Amino acid sequence: MKKLMLLALLLCAPIAVLQADTEAQPMTIKESTAFCEKNVPEYCISTTCNLYCDTLRTEASKANCKSECTADKRCKLKPLAGNDDPKNAALDADNREKLIACIAEKRDPAGTKSGRRMTQWEHIMTPSLAKIIPQDKQPMAK
């Protein structure tokens, strides 16, 4: 009997692990917010902010802009209430959009309950930012 149970466990365990890997579990609001408030600025710092800075005209402006690609400056998450810096408005709006999409994605990975966009949050780009970043540099939507 023990051998039969052990055999069943050995045969079923890989299936359970495979299912766990392919099906993302929904997060709570608190978990998804914490995850996204950490990851969206990190993504901005490593990707979006540099793309944004490359659109500036002079090399000095580009270098200055890239030095400000931090979680406290250009990639700081700002509320919807119009606190955007006019020089950084496109990037602020894009970060907000990514934050909202990230939370929705983590709360409803399958997209069956919320009606969220099925585009990964990293691949979303607001029209104002997409207008200034060359198309060949933009993250590809999936």
Image (cartoon, helix red, strand yellow):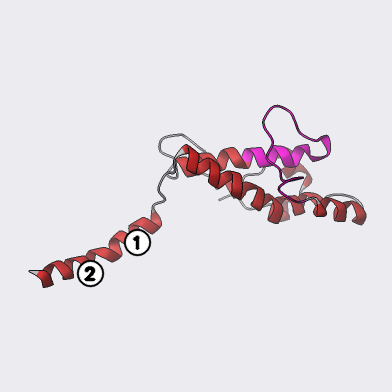
Q: Earlier in the sequence, mark 2 or mark 1?
A: 2
Observer able to see residue 105: no
Q: Which residues are magenta?
A: 69-97
Most extreme residue toward the left is 1
- Quick one: label 1, few (<14), some, or many (20+) residues within 10 Å? few
Mark 1, residue position: 18
Specify whether 87 is left or right of 81: right
Specify whether 91 is left or right of 23: right
The amino acid marked with disc number 1 is Leu
Residue shown at 17%/66% (left/top)?
A: 8
Most extreme residue toward the bottom is 3
Residue shown at 46%/40% (left/top)?
A: 107
Observer able to see residue 75: yes
Mark 2, residue position: 10
Magenta region includes residue 77: yes
Specify whether 11 is left or right of 29: left
Magenta region includes residue 33: no
